[in-house]
């Protein structure tokens, strides 16, 4: 019968009627109604009364899921020259790219470091309707590209941890990215900062030849709960998870069982069918599905998070698994248990999705296309109970002459 919670006699703001609710945290995958009031979920149950409801939205035939969390994006946008994803032209303002995909929370991973997080907070976090969280780059200046990201002297575990603990509402992790040297120093310093601040580390690994050992990274360097992103990439300077014989590396599944989080981080160069399809066939599915959204990925094979989710829907993952990988699982990874579910009292961040049937094509970062017959589209997005995206006006009154 779903989750029960007393309804008062007062008017309810909005009732989503007749949709299929998928809420992995609460074990829900069935046709249920969802009642919202004052920005919160009030009740989830069957055949809820429409009495004293201000607005009833018919979502029959659609999926109602918690607001989607994009665990890997780049949103420290700005106009600084040669700044890449740290106050530069390649990052994106979140609101233009979130609600239309059902995303209500984004995590900027590594755009800012301890030196410039306050600027990122003022410029983006405080001005966005989307909830914006952050992984601090272990490099104090953030992800500015080039030599800045190779500067071992600017990788300070103590100062990074201090910045994280000073802003616990927004900082949820530490990021290592784009380091091309043979040392383990960036990883070790990031883990040290993560341990001091009690937050996870995300690793964008590789860039040196001969490649550093992934087995060492997974078993010796990272802690359970730390994140390996771009897990279906095949890039120069990093051992791929699937070898040239289409075999999954023998240490991958044990690492996942140990608690290492494997994140998609599709991006503009980090998702290949040659990696994803054989990996899933051998039982290796991602823990979290994310975009690595920036100007270099949004118009290529990645497009948006729903497109990435649709790819996995067509190559072997079930709908419930996919929704968990963009809602409750990332909420747990970033230690935000208030997010990613529809429990009574939770903030009413909700996505209403349509599953389209037809003939579709999905491309990887090398331009190879896989055909599919299912695709997800966002019909409606609510942030704190307010409609922020409505593709076909289903929450609006019908015009009459």
Image (tube, grey):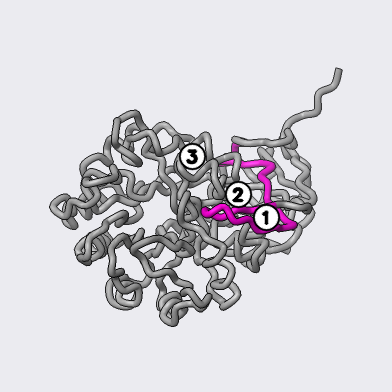
Residue 348: in sight, yes or no? no
Quadrant where the N terminus is found in the figure: bottom right
Observer-side mark, 1 or 3, equals 3
The Cα–Cα distance between marks 2 and 1, rounded to whole angstroms, is 8 Å
Residue 230, relative to residue 258: is it above or below? above
Provide the residue span drawn in magenta: 361-386
Mark on residue 44?
Answer: 1
Is 374 magenta? The answer is yes
In the rendered image, which residue does mark 2 sit on? 41
Give the secondary structure at mark 3. Answer: loop
Quarter assignment of residue 117: top left
Q: Is residue 50 left or right of residue 86?
A: right
Q: Main secondary structure of the magenta part?
A: strand
The residue shown at (53%, 55%) is: 340
In the rendered image, which residue does mark 3 sit on? 130
The residue shown at (75%, 40%) is: 56
* Residues under numbered marks 2 and 1 in contact, where contact means CB atoms less than 8 Å apart: yes
The Cα–Cα distance between marks 1 and 3, rounded to whole angstroms, is 24 Å
Q: Is residue 182 left or right of residue 358?
A: left
Q: Residue furthest right?
A: 401
Residue 2: percent from the left, percent from the top? 69, 62
Q: Report the number of numbered marks.
A: 3
The Cα–Cα distance between marks 2 and 3, rounded to whole angstroms, is 18 Å
Which of the pair 353/52 is nearer the observer?
A: 353
Q: Is residue 336 left or right of residue 55?
A: left
Which of the pair 9/103 is nearer the observer?
A: 103
């Amino acid at each position: 019968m779903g989750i029960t919670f007393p309804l008062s006699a007062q008017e309810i703001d909005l009732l989503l009627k007749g949709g299929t609710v998928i809420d992995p945290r609460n074990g829900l995958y069935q046709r249920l109604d969802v009642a919202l009031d004052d920005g919160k979920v009030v009740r989830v149950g069957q055949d809820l009364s429409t009495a004293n409801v201000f607005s009833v939205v018919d979502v029959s035939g659609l999926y109602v899921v918690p607001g989607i969390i994009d665990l890997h994006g780049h949103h420290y946008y700005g106009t600084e020259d040669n700044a890449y994803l740290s106050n530069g032209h390649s990052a994106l303002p979140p609101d233009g790219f979130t609600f239309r995909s059902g995303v209500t929370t984004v995590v900027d991973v590594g755009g800012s470091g301890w030196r410039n997080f306050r600027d990122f907070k003022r410029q983006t976090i405080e001005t966005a309707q989307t909830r914006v969280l952050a992984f601090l780059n272990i490099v104090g200046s953030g992800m500015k590209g080039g030599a800045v990201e190779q500067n071992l002297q600017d990788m300070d575990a103590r100062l990074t941890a201090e910045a994280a603990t000073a802003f616990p509402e927004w900082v949820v992790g530490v990021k290592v990215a784009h380091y091309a040297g043979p040392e383990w120093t960036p990883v070790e310093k990031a883990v040290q900062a993560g341990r001091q601040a009690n937050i996870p580390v995300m690793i964008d690994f590789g860039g040196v030849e001969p490649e550093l050992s992934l087995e060492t990274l997974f078993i010796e360097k990272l802690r359970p709960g730390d994140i390996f992103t771009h897990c279906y990439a095949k890039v120069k300077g990093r051992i791929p998870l699937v070898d040239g014989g289409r075999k999954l590396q023998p240490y991958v599944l044990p690492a996942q069982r140990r608690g290492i989080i494997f994140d998609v981080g599709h991006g503009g160069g980090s998702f290949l069918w040659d990696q994803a399809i054989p990996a899933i066939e051998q039982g290796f599915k991602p823990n979290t599905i994310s975009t690595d959204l920036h100007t270099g990925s949004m118009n290529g094979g990645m497009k948006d998070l729903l497109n990435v989710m649709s790819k996995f829907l067509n190559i072997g993952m079930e709908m419930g698994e996919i929704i968990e990988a963009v809602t409750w699982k990332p909420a747990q990874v970033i230690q935000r248990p208030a997010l990613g579910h529809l429990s009574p009292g939770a903030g009413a961040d909700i996505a209403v999705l349509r599953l389209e049937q037809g003939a579709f094509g999905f491309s990887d970062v090398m331009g190879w296309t896989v055909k599919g017959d299912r695709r997800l589209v966002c019909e409606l997005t609510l942030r704190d109970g307010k409609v922020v995206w409505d593709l076909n006006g289903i929450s609006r009154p019908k015009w009459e002459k």
